[in-house]
Image (spheres, helix red, strand yellow):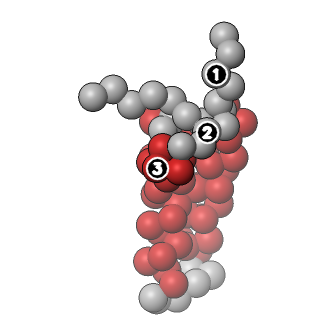
Amino acid sequence: MKLQLNEAPIDRVIRIVLGIALGGVAFAGAVTAPWLYVVWVVAAIALVTAIVGFCPLYALLRVGTKSTTR
């Protein structure tokens, strides 16, 4: 099964910036447990989906930000 890209480049950049920012907030200690774990998980999900280019939630909802014309 091949995952089709469903994220536009700008969406991927936003997710990378968001993931790095959330990771920095968590690493700096601006949040405490249990929210610390939530922030780490959201940061990891944002980074992984940005790197892969596939968002499972987009696929489940049958939406995407990537243009289909090309």
Q: Report which residue position mark 3 lands on.
A: 60
Which amino acid type is marked by label 2? Gly
- Distance between the Cα atoms at labels 3 and 1? 17 Å
- Distance between the Cα atoms at labels 3 and 2? 10 Å
Disc number for residue 16: none
- Return the x and y of residue 66 as percentages of the image width and height: 64, 30
Q: For numbered disc 1, what is the local secondary structure?
A: loop
Q: Name the residue located 58 percent from the left edge and 84 percent from the top edge.
A: 31
Name which of mark 3 and mark 1 comes first in the sequence.
3
Residue 1 image-quadrant placement: top left
Towards the viewer: 32 or 42: 42
Q: Report which residue position mark 1 lands on.
A: 68
Q: Badges 1 and 2: C-beta atoms under 8 Å apart?
A: yes
Which amino acid type is marked by label 1? Thr
Drawn side of residue 1 relative to residue 55, left or right? left
Q: Name the residue located 72 percent from the left edge and 36 percent from the top edge.
A: 10
Q: How many neighbours does mark 3 have within 10 angstroms: few (below 14), some (14-19), or many (20 or more)?
A: few
Q: Residue furthest front?
A: 62
